[in-house]
Amino acid sequence: MIFLNGKWLMIIKKNDEITIKKGNQSSNEEWVIFAEDGHKVLLDTIKTPMYNPSGELIGILGIAHDITERNKILSQFEATTTLLSAIIESSPNVVVFALDKNYHYLTFNKKHKEIIKMIWGKEISVGTNMMDIFGNHPDKEKAKANFDRALAGEYLSIVEEYGDEEKTRQFWQDYYSPIYSSNGEIIGVTCFVLDISELKRAEAALKESEYFFKESQHAAFIGSYKADLLRKRWESSEVLDQIFGIDKDLYQKTNDGFFDIVHPEDRGHLKIILVEDSINKRKPFNSEFRIVRKSDGVTRWVYGLGKVIANDQGNVTSLIGTIMDITELKNASEELKASEEQLRELNATKDKFFSINAHDLRNPFSVVLGISEIMADKSVLFTMDEMRQNSELLYKTASSTYALLENLLEWSSLQRGICKLKIESISLEKFIKNLNESISEIALKKSITLVNNIPQDATILADPNMLHSILRNLLTNAIKFTSSGGSVTISAKMQSDNSFLFTVKDTGIGIPDSIMKNMFRIDINISRPGTSGEPSTGLGLILCKEFVEKHGGSIWVESEEGKGSTFSFTIPAFSD
């Protein structure tokens, strides 16, 4: 308490003086500097005027409290409150609120107020009981249980879904913390909340996408991979592990591990495609190759696709893509190709047969009938030379027609599948001698020398009828396309694998490249007349090819126009 006399009235503030003159009490906060030590204090003062019995103002009675420290604390609190308010309002996506022990709001930010309005349709203010917002909704008990855990001293973080179904439900990441008083007593709870609805929806969409992707891979049996080119390792999907036949956890998914799965015959080519084309030239990876499945050692065909990925510096760092098991598709494709080829051959066979019937058989018979008709005409008289010429023509025509009929019958047997392989032991020297006797007259008529280079005592296991047809056709063809005075040589020798290599070499006119590349194809007509005009159908060579292949051998030709031809074929060794 301070008593101010007339001296101190001089320092009273003007407004206080006016108030006192009116006879009223004055209350102020005043800064006062004490002259004794010069310190400055803030006083909370109450000043009352004092009067004598005559009613004259004789002074004032003042009561003052030093509120300097309290003012500092209040200033700091205001600054802290302002800062806290700025912090909790600074993020538009963060919800902040605090409740007392009875679930009444102590404070909240604007975002929380907006959210409560959006998902519950309620307005809130400080003092509102949060439990009243939920009404009878099941979310009420869930929220109360979380608050009670925090009020019991637990710090917790929970992801939950809240909201009125008729308005909207959102996913929230909630962080609950107890509020402690200065004496350590829990007096409330704070809650920081993040709206993670979009994140949860994205996660759900991602999971759904991953599920459909995984199920689609299983349905189509397509596996996916990612190869880390820097670490030289790769990752694979569940389906790709099944395709490769590997254990996802135990198998070493390194570069060496991958190429160990690839079929040995395909590794070199695949490395070239991957390194030179995809990695170096950055071309999309696109290749069919074989693998050897690790689980059972079975060879499978797969089809791989891939794309290189580069970093910000433009360096290739990885390869991602898919691999599909195409074994069944490959087999089906091969079967389709075989069916198409078979159909093509059947059509060609039909066309060949009609062509032979329409031309190659009809023309010889026309010759025979024409000459026979003239010779049967009693009014026509022939000289001996004319009779000889007509007889030679008849014989030549009949011989070529008979040879054609032989080939047709054998070919027919092949087409009907009744021509079976019957392996016998054959003495080649005797066999070739008998064969030469049947064709020597044809060679003699053209003054062509037959040379037999078959080794003595040579024996082969083969079907005698088929071998006879092969050699007969090759020898007669050689004679047909060799001019008078030439030669035809037949040779045979055993090779290191005990198979026999036969060759029929002539000094004839040779074969053009355009004809030679199609020599053994039934679907292409390569017939041409011999050096003496002999007819040719090309059927004999087709028979030769089929009979050789029935033995498991192969046949080929080497020729140069004007220098002759050499036909070769092999007959593999057979067991008795």
Image (cartoon, rainbow, N blue to C red):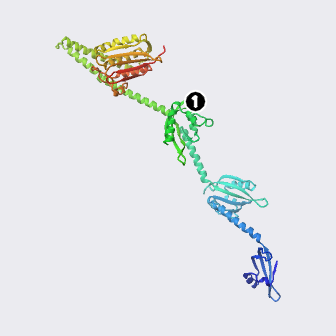
Going by the image, does 479 lie left or right of 342? left
Q: Position of residue 141 (x, y in %)?
A: 70, 54
Residue 212 quadrant: top right
Q: Does the image show residue 529?
A: yes
Q: Amino acid at mark 1?
A: Asp
Residue 12 quadrant: bottom right
Q: Does the image show residue 304?
A: no
Going by the image, does 114 lie left or right of 370? right
Going by the image, does 84 lie left or right of 258? right
Q: Residue extending furthest right?
A: 53
Residue 519 quadrant: top left
**On the image, numbered disc 1 is attached to which residue?**
296
Q: Nearer the viewer, residue 252 or 87?
A: 252
The answer to whether residue 443 is above or below residue 317 is above
Q: Position of residue 222 (x, y in %)?
A: 53, 38
- Which element is circle 1 on? loop
Q: Position of residue 516 (x, y in %)?
A: 35, 26
Quadrant in which the N terminus is drawn: bottom right
Q: Nearer the viewer, residue 420 or 488?
A: 488
Q: Residue extending furthest bottom?
A: 54
How many C-alpha atoms fall within 10 Å of the one at disc 1: few (<14), some, or many (≥20)?
Answer: few
Q: Position of residue 105 (x, y in %)?
A: 70, 62
The answer to whether residue 70 is above or below residue 264 is below
Q: Residue extending furthest front?
A: 37
Q: Nearer the viewer, residue 122 or 407?
A: 407
Q: How many marks?
A: 1
Q: Nearer the viewer, residue 73 or 152?
A: 73
